[in-house]
Image (cartoon, helix red, strand yellow):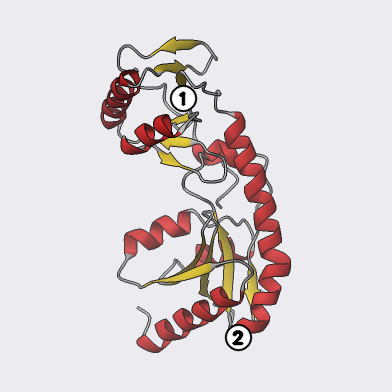
Amino acid sequence: MHNHEDSERLASYADVLAGELPGAWTSTYHPSDRKDDLAELADRVWDLDLVADSLADHPLQHAAVLSRQDGAQLVVLDRHDGRDGFLIAAVAPRILPDEAYRGVREPNGIALADDPFLSAEQVAGDLLARYDTALTQARHNAAASVHPSQPERVVLTWQQDGGLAAAPVGETAAAILAANGFVPDAQTGIYRLSGDDTAAQARAVRATGRQLNAQGIATALQHPSGRIAPTSTPPAAPAPAASRAGSTRVR
C-alpha cells in the first residue's frame, strides 16, 4: 500500500509532465484501490525491457496515465532501483486487436529523473517518437485486416480475437455501428465490436443489420477465408481465437 505522500508525489509529477509534452495531454491518477484498472493497465504496457522487468518483480500498485486525444497513452509508475524519479512506458490501445501488434517493435519505456521539466524533453525526443511510429504501424496492420465497406453495404470482418471490425462509409452507418456497441478508432476510422460475449455480439449484429437495412444499407460478413456472405441470420460464433501468447505488445 502506498502512503499519501507517495501518491501525491507521483500524481503531481505526472500532472506537470503532461503539461510539458508536445500536444494536448491530460493526466489521470489511478490509486491502489482500483485493482482491476491497474491490472488491466499493466497488461497493456507496451514494453519488453526495463518497465516489463520492473512489473515482473513489482506489480503495479498505483500509476498515472497520460492521455492524448487520438488515443495515445503513457503510464508513469514508480522506480524500484533505489534512485529518484519514475518510469514511463507506452500503453497499447485496447481498441486494436492483438494481431495488429505482431511484427511491430515495442516502444520500450525509459527511466525518468526527478525533474518533470527535463523529463518532458526526454520523453518527447525519445519514447514519444518511437511510440508514434509503433502506433502508426499497428493501426496500419489493423486497417489492412478489415474488408472495405461501400456506401450501400457495410462489411463486418471477423478478427483473430473473435471480434468484428468494420470501416463504414458515411455518417449514418457509422452512427448505427456506434449505437450498437462498435467502438471507433479515430485514427483509422475502424469500428470494432468485442467478441468476449458472443451472445451479446450476435444481438448487436442483428440490431445493427436491422437498423442499417432500414436506411437502405445492406450488411455482409467477411469470413476468415475472405468469402463475403450477407448477414440475414445471426453470425455463428467464430472459431476459437488463436493463442495471444504470440502477441508482441506485452511481456
Residue 194 as seen in the image, left or right of residue 234: right
**Residue drawn at the location 54% of the way across and 14% of the way down:** 225
Residue 219 image-quadrant placement: top left
**Residue drawn at the location 30% of the way across and 34% of the way down:** 197
Residue 1 lies, in percent from the top left, at 35, 78
Q: How many marks?
A: 2
Residue 38 as seen in the image, left or right of residue 81: left
User: Within 10 Å of the Cα at label 2, are there few (<14), some (14-19), or many (20+) other Cα atoms?
Assistant: few
Amino acid type, mark 1: Trp
Tell me the residue that label 1 is attached to.
158
Q: Residue furthest right?
A: 125
Mark 1–mark 2 Cα distance, whole angstroms, equals 46 Å
Residue 235 lies, in percent from the top left, at 34, 18
**Residue drawn at the location 51% of the way across and 64% of the way down:** 55
Query: Which-is-in-front pick, marks 1 and 2?
Result: 1
Secondary structure at numbered mark 1: strand
Residue 85 as seen in the image, left or right of residue 206: right
Secondary structure at numbered mark 2: loop
> Looking at the picture, does residue 218 appear above or below residue 107?
above
Residue 114, label in figure? 2
Amino acid type, mark 2: Asp
Residue 177 lies, in percent from the top left, at 38, 33
Residue 50 lies, in percent from the top left, at 63, 65
**Residue drawn at the location 49% of the way across and 34% of the way down:** 243
